[in-house]
Image (cartoon, grey):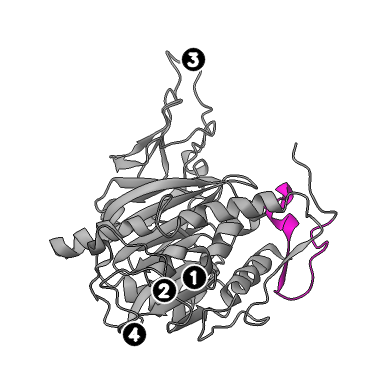
């Protein structure tokens, strides 16, 4: 059995938000507490896209931490969600990623559930030839999977088990909410999806997403082909509770030394064989060419030029996680714009020209801290607070993550 790597929950945790003890990424007790206090607590979790369940009977399966979830479109159009666990012996109710059904039936003993997760039928409930069966006082309504509160925002379906969770919009905060609506302002379509397995604790990936100053250092493709530099305009928003963040990059002023047309590298002689890869089209009515937005604990929305995607973090233990990517387009895309999105999708992903490094660096940290349980990371870039900034040379949104995490965990 995995053993705790610190003596007590508060051991070696310095005050403030600028130091994070490394045991927090490795302790199995922390992982178990996260499932109870965060993933099953008063926190909103991204589940799926509304367009993935368009008609009554359509469903998708997803995860809320370690908890498997079914999201379904019920009669009358409501989107509902419930634990993907049969109330009989605990087997999964749904085995597929998605589909369309009249109701749900557990494959193990054929207990049946309606689209809202209510138990409707038990096989051999009355026994066979007057023998066996369930007790006469067996109450169907008293048995069933746990139900989630759901909310749909900008075509995104969120869920929570907690009746005391705040309103979703209040949870996100007005500033970041405006950035969410900026991108998801009309109906989307799914362009593609895949799952990436990463050899690191899930918190390391969310830190990376919120780390706004590594981009021009780790991702040489960004600077080589002038996609983003810290010298460009932009900044960081962080909600008051630390739950949400949005970082933005403004288009660089184009001139003899900054033109995208030639795709010139920084004195390295690199060029793109197909320069059309980086052709883009302004579509949001502003000068923002790159926006990364996150909502605690595990949702990310990206806009890199015209490449749109949502990402969902799913923990798989203390040193492993799945990252579910769903690439998006708008329903009214022209063929030219859709082609741009598909080409630019190669920027981000397991082998993306940009985010390939993000898939590796979390594992580098996980390996590097293996014997450093009494040490802590330094998160001081840009100060000590979790407030927004007009520069991306800051770790304010990383500190915001830990502000939300510590509040949720009571540490």
**Mark 1 nearby-residue class (10 Å; few <14, some 14–19, many ≥20):** some
82 left or right of 274 in image: right
Cβ–Cβ under 8 Å for marks 4 and 3? no
In the rendered view, tell whether residue 36 sits above or below residue 390.
Answer: above
Q: What residue would you read off at disc 4?
A: 253
Q: Earlier in the sequence, mark 1 or mark 3?
A: 3
Nearest the camera: 13 or 199?
199
In the rendered image, is residue 78 in sight?
A: no
For residue 107, what is the image quadrant? top left
Query: Nearer the viewer's eye, disc 2 or disc 3?
Result: 2
**Mark 4 nearby-residue class (10 Å; few <14, some 14–19, many ≥20):** few
Q: Earlier in the sequence, mark 1 or mark 2?
A: 1
Badge count: 4
Q: Residue furthest top?
A: 129
Q: Quadrant of the C terminus?
A: bottom right
Q: Earlier in the sequence, mark 1 or mark 4?
A: 1
- Residue beneath the point at 74% across and 76% down: 16
Position in image of residue 334 (x %, y %)? 14, 64
Q: Earlier in the sequence, mark 4 or mark 2?
A: 2
Q: What residue would you read off at disc 2?
A: 228
- Residue beneath the point at 47% across and 35% down: 92
In the rendered view, tell whether residue 166 sits above or below residue 193.
Answer: below
Q: Earlier in the sequence, mark 2 or mark 3?
A: 3
Position in image of residue 378 (x %, y %)? 71, 70
């Amino acid at each position: 059995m995995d053993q705790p790597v610190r003596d007590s929950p508060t051991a070696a945790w310095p005050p403030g938000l600028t130091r994070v003890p490394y045991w927090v990424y490795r302790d199995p007790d922390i992982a178990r507490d996260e499932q109870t206090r965060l993933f099953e607590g008063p926190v909103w979790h991204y589940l799926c896209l509304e367009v993935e369940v368009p008609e009554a009977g359509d469903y998708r399966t997803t995860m809320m931490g370690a908890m498997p979830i079914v999201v379904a479109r019920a009669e009358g159009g409501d989107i509902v969600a419930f634990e993907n666990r049969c109330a009989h012996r605990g087997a999964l109710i749904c085995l597929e990623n998605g589909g369309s059904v009249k109701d749900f039936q557990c494959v193990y003993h054929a207990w049946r559930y309606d689209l809202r997760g209510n138990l409707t039928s038990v096989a051999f409930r009355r026994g066979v030839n007057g023998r066996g069966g369930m007790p006469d006082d067996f109450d169907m309504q008293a048995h069933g999977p746990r139900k989630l509160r759901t909310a749909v925002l900008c075509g995104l379906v969120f869920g929570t088990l907690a009746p005391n969770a705040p309103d979703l919009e209040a949870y996100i905060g007005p500033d970041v909410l405006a950035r969410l609506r900026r991108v998801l302002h009309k109906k989307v379509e799914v362009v593609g999806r895949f799952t990436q397995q990463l050899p690191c604790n899930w918190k390391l990936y969310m830190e990376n997403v919120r780390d706004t100053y590594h981009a021009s250092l780790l991702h040489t493709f960004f600077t080589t082909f002038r996609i983003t530099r810290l010298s460009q305009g932009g900044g960081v928003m962080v909600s008051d509770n630390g739950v949400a963040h949005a970082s933005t990059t403004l288009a660089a002023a184009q001139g003899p030394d900054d033109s995208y047309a030639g795709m010139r590298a920084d004195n390295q002689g690199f060029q793109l064989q197909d320069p059309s890869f980086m052709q883009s089209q302004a579509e949001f009515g502003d000068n923002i060419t790159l926006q990364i937005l996150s909502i605690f604990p595990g949702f990310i929305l990206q806009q890199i030029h015209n490449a749109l995607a949502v990402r969902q973090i799913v923990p798989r233990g203390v040193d492993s996680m799945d990252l579910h990517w769903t690439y998006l387009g708008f329903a009214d895309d022209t063929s030219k714009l859709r082609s741009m999105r598909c080409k630019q999708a190669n920027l981000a992903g397991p082998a993306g020209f940009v985010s390939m490094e993000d898939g590796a660096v979390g594992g580098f940290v996980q390996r590097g801290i293996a014997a450093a349980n009494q040490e802590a990371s330094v998160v001081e870039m840009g100060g000590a607070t979790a407030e927004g900034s007009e520069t991306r040379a800051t770790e304010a949104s990383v500190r915001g993550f830990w502000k939300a995490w510590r509040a949720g965990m009571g540490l």
